[in-house]
Image: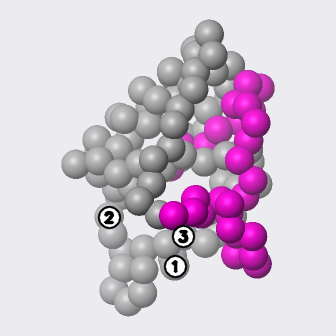
Amino acid sequence: MLLTLEMLTPLPVYRDEIVGADSLATRLDTLEGRVIGLLPNWRPSAFDLLKALGEVLKERCGVAEIVLEQPTREVPVKKGRLLDGMDAQLDDLARRVDAVITATGD
């Protein structure tokens, strides 16, 4: 079963179509046989949402493996942004997977 998704955005150009030093990675042609990372925020619903999505991706899209990262339990930010303190975790995840999907939940 072929699953197709249409991405909608209010932006005139998708971020992954912009070429530059800080460009997004090229889109995958297929998810079949790929390792997909799932990265929830610190809300419990995000974890549940991505866990369910991972099951669907394996079942319908032929994803080889799902890597579900544990969410940050609290927001340890006193200065800067949340992602500033997660560089090592994000770099490690990027080395282990072909693509990452993130979600927020409440």
- Circle 2/circle 1 CB separation < 8 Å: no
The x and y percentages for residue 49 are 37, 35
Residue at 38 percent across and 41 percent down: it is 47
Distance between the Cα atoms at labels 2 and 1? Answer: 14 Å
Check disc 2 and report its element: helix, strand or loop. Answer: loop
Looking at this view, name the residue that lies furthest to the left.
106
Q: Foreground: 30 or 14?
A: 14
Distance between the Cα atoms at labels 1 and 3? Answer: 6 Å
Left/right placement of residue 1 relative to residue 98 reads left
* Magenta stretch: dominant secondary structure: loop
Judging by the rendered image, the residue that carries numbered circle 2 is 74
- Circle 1/circle 3 CB separation < 8 Å: yes
Q: Is residue 64 visible?
A: no
* Numbered circle sitting on residue 86: 3
Left/right placement of residue 28 relative to residue 8 reads right
- Circle 2/circle 3 CB separation < 8 Å: no
| Type of amino acid at the residue the image marks with label 3 | Met
The x and y percentages for residue 41 are 39, 55
| Type of amino acid at the residue the image marks with label 2 | Glu
The x and y percentages for residue 76 are 36, 74
Residue at 47 percent across and 63 percent down: it is 11
| Residue 51 quadrant | top left
